Image (cartoon, rainbow, N blue to C red):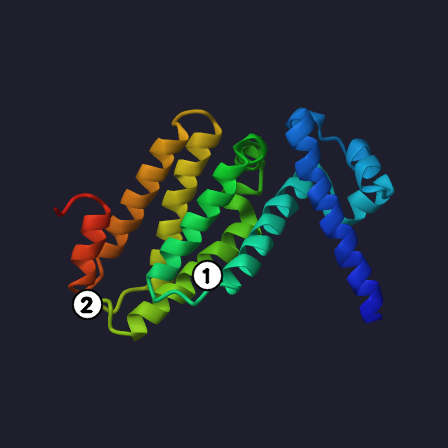
Amino acid sequence: MSHGWETRQQRTRSEILRAVGDIIAADGLDGLTMRKLAERANVAVATLYNQFDDRSGVLVAFVGHGLDELELSLDEQPAAEPVDGTRVLLGALDDTIGSADHVWRPVLATIGASPGSQRMGAVGDRIIAAIGVDLAKARAAGLFFVDCDTDRLARHVFVQWMRGLERWAHGTIDWATHRANAELGLELALAAVLVEPHRSDALRRADILR
């Protein structure tokens, strides 16, 4: 398989996923159909089914594409210190979602309600893995006072963040409440394992220690 063919395939996929955001922004999630997407992206409907299986697969891929672009953006920034990397990642994810909430809100609400895609599926696993790498670096740097299971901690941090995001997507809480709860949950989870002075810093970020 030639590199040129793979590049064209990737470019086509990116154009399709950009078209997803355009359609949702203009017509809402109900306006996103496979036929309309094929017309907007100038591809055959069969191409969409071959690449994404169905409309739910398109939405999951759209979320994954957003994560891809975010990772590229973060790679261009100076590397964050351990623990701060998790703060930066979740903060950047929230910034991305909040900047286009009219697009992301219905997408996340639909994904959360779809069988087999709870917690964003493979996309969620990628976020958990990134958090786990950051927390493992913190443990190796001696920032934790206990030898904790960083993979389990990473999953807990992600699930708590995702639960708040799903509540916002379904209209149970507003965006400001999600952001406040997300920061509080993250900092309390970190404070449970961090050594001083990092523990106190986390509690101050949570607005508990003054």
Which residue is pictured at 42% across the width and 31% down the height?
167
- Residue 86 placement (x, y as % from top left): 38, 57
Q: Amino acid at mark 1?
A: Ala
Of the pair 151 and 35, the residue shown nearer to us: 35
CA distance separating discs 1 and 2:
22 Å
Which residue is pictured at 79% across the width and 52% down the height?
12
Judging by the rendered image, the residue that carries numbered circle 2 is: 145
Judging by the rendered image, the residue that carries numbered circle 1 is: 130
Which residue is pictured at 18% across the width and 65% down the height?
195
Q: Residue furthest front?
A: 77
Q: Residue furthest left?
A: 210
Which residue is pictured at 52% across the width and 64% down the height?
75
SS state under label 2 = loop
Q: Amino acid at mark 2?
A: Phe
Judged left or right of residue 54, residue 145 is left
Marks 2 and 1: in contact by CB < 8 Å? no
